[in-house]
Every structure is written in structure tokens, then in C-alpha cells.
Amino acid sequence: MNRILIAEDEERIASFVEKGLRANGFTTTVAADGDTAYEFALTGGFDLVVLDIGLPGRDGFTVLRQLREARSTVPVIVLTARASVTDTVAGLEGGADDYMTKPFRFEELLARVRLRLRTAARAPEVTVLRSGDLSLDLRTRRAQAGGRMVDLTAREFVLLELFLRHPGQVLSREQILSHVWGYDFDPGSNIVDVYVRALRKKMGAERVETVRGMGYRLPARRPDEPEPSY
Ligand code: CA
């Protein structure tokens, strides 16, 4: 899993970083402002964030601080102008894993991205996601619903993982689309609905709720709550 969020408003730089990372086998998503970057990073669908400090909306410092406040542990590499390194270092306390000054060589960024991903991979992490009697083992890629094993395709797995990382939270079609399929997909596509239907068919219709006009939600149910009857 090497999904990288690039939070950068300068198109030229965003495209430079994106092309380079893609050429090296990473999946990338670009967010051109701080608000979008924060929302995307918080979904848990990214393994690393390359974060520019000077962003429209929330700036990079705010994005970083709010991510850490929200207990997100996603590795973050900050991009900053050379002139403001001192500010940057001060502003990063307790937040970023690394920083780079612009302009930078792509190879240097790539080396840092790889290093951060390796470090993160060594850290203990949750390997089984649960909500109620629904569980997903991220190592064996096995899903269980109500004690029954469920066979998932690769995309269904990523979709269920996204839901399980945000139980009780409404995910819009756009959010789901960009995380599971990336931005190459037509936003008018109904592929999200198709895959939600597939998940429901395999796990039970009640597992994914439709929130009209907003998107989909995995009902947050405590494990000690009785199964509702449908
Ligand atoms: Ca900028």
C-alpha cells in the first residue's frame, strides 16, 4: 500500500511530484488547498502526505496540527520555501516526520518518502479493523460478517477498509471514489454505488447505510449491542 497525498497548490510542483511518484509505482492524489488536504488525509486512505506549507484555505501548519489533534499518525513530509526554514522547524514541533526546502530534487524527495514509509511499516499498527460483528484482517485480507467469512475482490477490500476506518461517518461518493479509484475516474460514474451494492450482497444489506443526498455510512455499533433485526 503506497498511496500518497500531495497537498500542493502550485500546479507545476504538484504535477512534478505526482509524475515522479507515479513513475516509481506510487498511487497519488493531489489536494490543491488546505481544507481538502485535511479532509483527505483524515480518511486514513493514505500512507504518507507530502504537505506544502503555503496553501490556500488552512495552511500546512494548521493541517498538520489538526491531523495530529485528530490522532492521525500518517507520516507527513513538509515542503517549505528555503527562506522560511527557521519558521518551519519551529512550526513543526510535534507534527511532521521530515521536511524539505524548495526547490528540491525529485530523487531526494523519493528517498525520504521511501524512508518514511519503511519506518511507518515497522511501527506497530492495527491489523484487524472491527465494527460490531464486522471485521477485516488487513494482513490476511479476510473479512468476516456475523461470524461468516466473506470473499472480497481487491476493490471491495479497499472500500470496506475505508468504511471500517470511519465507522458511523458519512463518506461522500466523491471521497470514496478518490480513495478507492483515484482521480482518474469520472466523478459522474456510478461505480461507487455498484460496489456498495456488491458489499451489501456479500455482507448483508444493513451493513452499509445510504444517507440520502450525502453518501454512505457504516453504522457504528458497539460490539456489546444486540444485532438489530431487519
Ligand atoms: Ca504553495
Image (cartoon, rainbow, N blue to C red):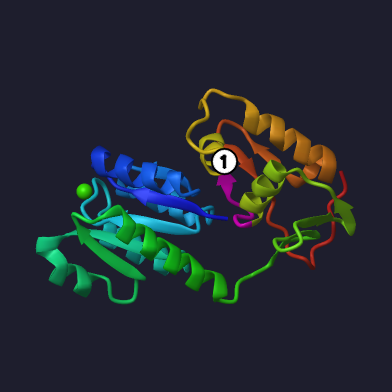
Q: Quadrant of residue 104?
A: bottom left
Q: Position of residue 77 (x, y in %)?
A: 34, 63
Residue farthest along the right direction in this orientation = 148
Compared with 133, 172 (above or below) is above
In the visual, does 88 lie left or right of 129?
Answer: left
**Front-most of residues 191 and 70:** 191
In the visual, does 112 lie left or right of 157?
Answer: left
Residue farthest along the left direction in this orientation = 83
**Front-most of residues 167 and 47:** 47
Which quadrant does the N terminus fall into? bottom right
Which residue is pictured at 29% across the width and 47% down the height? 8
Query: Does any portion of residue 70 appear in the rendered image?
Result: no
**Front-most of residues 85 and 147:** 85
Which residue is pictured at 27% across the width and 71% down the height? 92
**Front-most of residues 44 and 214:** 44
Magenta stretch contains residue 166: yes
Q: Position of residue 129 (x, y in %)?
A: 69, 63
Which residue is pictured at 33% across the width and 76% down the height? 94
Query: Does any portion of residue 178 appear in the rendered image?
Result: yes
Question: What is the magenta segment's predominant secondary structure?
Answer: loop
In the visual, does 57 lie left or right of 215?
Answer: left
Compared with 31, 187 (above or below) is above
Q: Residue beneath label 1, please? A: 176
Magenta stretch contains residue 129: no
SS under mark 1: helix
How many dots with numbers?
Answer: 1
Which quadrant does the C terminus fall into? top right
What residue type is disc 1 on? Ile
Q: Position of residue 18 (x, y in %)?
A: 38, 44
Q: Which residues are magenta?
A: 165-171
